[in-house]
Amino acid sequence: MAEIVHTEEVMGTVVSFHVEAPTLTESELWEAVTTSTALLHRDDETFSTWKPESPMSRLRRGELRLEDAPAEVAEVLDLCEAARTLSQGWFDAFSVPGGVDPTGLVKGWSLERALAVLVDAGISSAVVNGGGDIACHGEPIQGGPWRIGVRHPWRADALAAVVEVDRAIATSGEYERGRHLFDPIGRVGPPPASATVTGPSLTLADALATAVAVGGTEAFDIVASIDGYDAYLIGADGSELATSGIRFSDADPDERD
């Protein structure tokens, strides 16, 4: 069985790949990973708000019309609109100061696309982890679900929990980068310390985790009502909430966020 572990610096973070394929050679596996990482870099060049000449930056400044931008831009903005509706406004890429900003969704979308490249190449088992946004395919060698560690918001060397995941998990909070999340509604009181969402799509889980990270229990209740998605919330006071579908595990995690 061919197996590769690889890390790639892209999108302002480190993306790790752990892939296995019993039917592929190691060179075929590397080709798939190389294609996958190239896609991540291409998405970064398109959507980065830190790169002045990216299509997204030019669109935000009014220098580029949406119809003249790469087709992926319209696709992502349509997904942002769907996420805004589904989150009842707690995720809103369109009201961010400075212009539309899909940052809270686009990394999950890009990682999901990167995983699809690997699956199409014939990889049987894969985890793509971009700073706590994680897309999974297949299952670990030992069987069972993926067990993903959620970092403790106040203890960098500890886990708050280990969650069993089938497809995707995203965690959002301000414990690493400080205050950076935009609250489109205006929540009363301090934001949660950490918000984690699991579900079948990393694109939507990423956006919903951002929503819960700013909306707290109000957004948490919204996620609880969405079929297939679940949330785990750590409040500013250390209190914890989890929807009924969150599956905690005592086992060592296969991946950490």
Image (cartoon, rainbow, N blue to C red):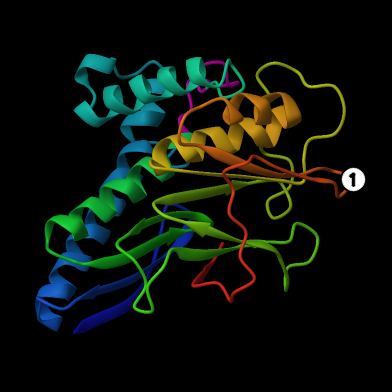
Residue 22 in the image: state x and y as whole percent.
15, 78
Q: Quadrant of the N terminus?
A: bottom left
- Is residue 18 at least partly visible in the picture? yes
Residue 196 among magenta residues: no
Helix, strand or loop at disc 1?
Answer: loop
Q: Quadrant of residue 52?
A: top left
Residue 221 in the image: state x and y as whole percent.
67, 26
**With 219 as the anchor, is 120 left or right in this view?**
left
Q: Quadrant of residue 222?
A: top right
Give the number of callouts: 1
Q: Quadrant of the C terminus?
A: bottom right
- Does 86 appear above or below 172? above
Q: Nearer the viewer, residue 174 or 90?
A: 90
- Does 54 appear above or below 84? below
Q: Nearer the viewer, residue 244 or 166?
A: 244
Residue 50 in the image: state x and y as whole percent.
47, 41
- Does 206 appear above or below 215? below
Residue 100 among magenta residues: yes
Q: Residues within 10 Å of mark 1 (few under 14, many from 20)?
A: few
Residue 96 in the image: state x and y as whole percent.
58, 21
In the image, the segment drawn in magenta is 93-102
Residue corresponding to mark 1 = 237
